[in-house]
Image (cartoon, rainbow, N blue to C red):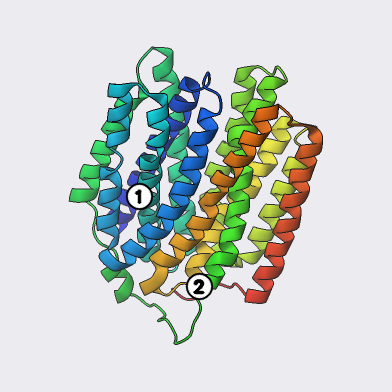
Amino acid sequence: MRIQFLLFTVLVFFTGVYLGEFRVAYPLEAAHVFNLAELSLVIFGFGKGIMNFASGFLSDVYGRKVVLTLGWLMAIPLPIVALIFHSLLLVALLTMFLAINQAMTWTTTITSQIDISRGRTGLAAGVNEASGYAGVTMGSLIAGYLLSVNVSPYILMGGVATTSFLLSFVGARETRPVMRSGKTRSLARGEKVLEPSVVLGLGGLLEKFVDAFFWLIVPAFLTLRGVNPLLVAYVVGTYVGVWTIFQPLTGYISDRMGRKVLILAGFLLMTLGMTLFMLNYFASALICGAGMAMVYPTLIAAVSDYSPPEGRGTSLGVYRLLRDSGYGVAGLLGLLVMRGDIFTYSETASLTQLVGFLSLMLWFALRSNAVKRTTQ
């Protein structure tokens, strides 16, 4: 199973590369069209959220490999359409294909890795998310370089999609039999597995709200203040880099020390980081990245703790439905913010207070639901 774990790690890396290329290529091309990038984010956020639930459910019914393979098949049309028709609005609408790809491939890789993790759920989630976001970083850098030499990143997106489809179809194995042959707990009569997913999913929505803050609002705000574009890239890169590098470590720590402490500490760090944004951009990015690294894999592991093997995909799907809808919410707020050019420090403080308050509410919800590590 080590080879399969490595294969899923490579596949989620390609999922990230595909997303990273699009996140750079499309916003730069659509920058001159009012609100088109924000529209794409709204479509992606809500579309991916809905498809996360569908993918998790389908993976429980039909298997992880089937959903993974179909997810990469759905990734092929977007770059082809972008290369042939050169329509920004059409590509914005086809962002739904991107959402389907990301939901089906990322959900199934992380579920599969947890299936074969032998109880090291936090570590498996940390490796998966770190690999995926390392791919996002790599894809963004490659797309930026290709655009600088007048080569369309959509060509490489098509190659990534095709390669990943073949790897999934030929190399990936179904992990449900492995999961069922290990030491697992069954679903007790009357046991509620979706309620913890919903509670933790609201925390996931908050973390995506912070992520969208650095994806959409921070670059726009710093640009409006006349900050050098390279410095803007360094600020955002600091946040993403710290988040990516430390996820395997924080996931491993959560396996050893439990989930709740890391979840609370991570949200408090993100609240502090957003508070410091106007005082020091880099300190804010560093602290928010550290907080995100603590929260991101730990929430996934906490959902898996509650999930019996036969319902793991569905539970993770519900969680990811709520979590990634945070992109859609942030995109709608971004439309309001960018429409009037009204982003100010007072709004930053208000967002900070909101995240802090909601993170405390999540903490109390976690206490009342007694989220704890369980035997896989």
* Place of residue 360 in the rendered image (x, y in percent of width and height, measured from the top left): 74, 61
Front residue of this view, candidates 262 and 366: 366
Give the residue drawn at x 28%, y 37%: 161
Q: Tell me where residue 228 appears, x and y as whole percent.
A: 65, 16
Name the residue at the left extreme. Answer: 170
Q: CA distance from mark 1 to mark 2?
A: 22 Å
Residue 113 visible in the current orientation: no
Q: Please, is residue 45 above or below residue 116 in the view?
A: above
Q: Position of residue 80 (x, y in %)?
A: 27, 29
Question: Which residue is identified by label 2?
Answer: 306
Q: Earlier in the sequence, mark 1 or mark 2?
A: 1
**Residue 335 visible, this angle:** yes
Residue at screen point 54% across, 54% down: 323
Disc marking residue 105: 1
Left or right: residue 238 compared with residue 132: right
Q: Nearer the viewer, residue 119 or 99?
A: 99
Mark 1 neighbour class, 10 Å CA radius: few under 14, some 14 to 19, many 20 or more: many
Count the numbered circles shown: 2
- Residue 221 shown left or right of residue 169 in the figure: right
Picture quadrant of residue 302: bottom right
Q: Residues within 10 Å of mark 2 (few under 14, many from 20)?
A: many
Where disc 2 sits, the SS reads: helix
Q: Quadrant of the N terminus?
A: bottom left
Identified at 73% across, 20% down, the residue is 225
Question: Who's the residue at 49% across and 48% down the image?
Answer: 46
- For the residue marked with disc 1, what is the amino acid? Thr
The residue closer to the viewer here, 33 or 357, is 33
Whether residue 289 sits left or right of residue 345 in the image: it is left
**Could you tell me which secondary element the residue under label 1 belongs to?**
helix
Q: Position of residue 234 (x, y in %)?
A: 61, 26
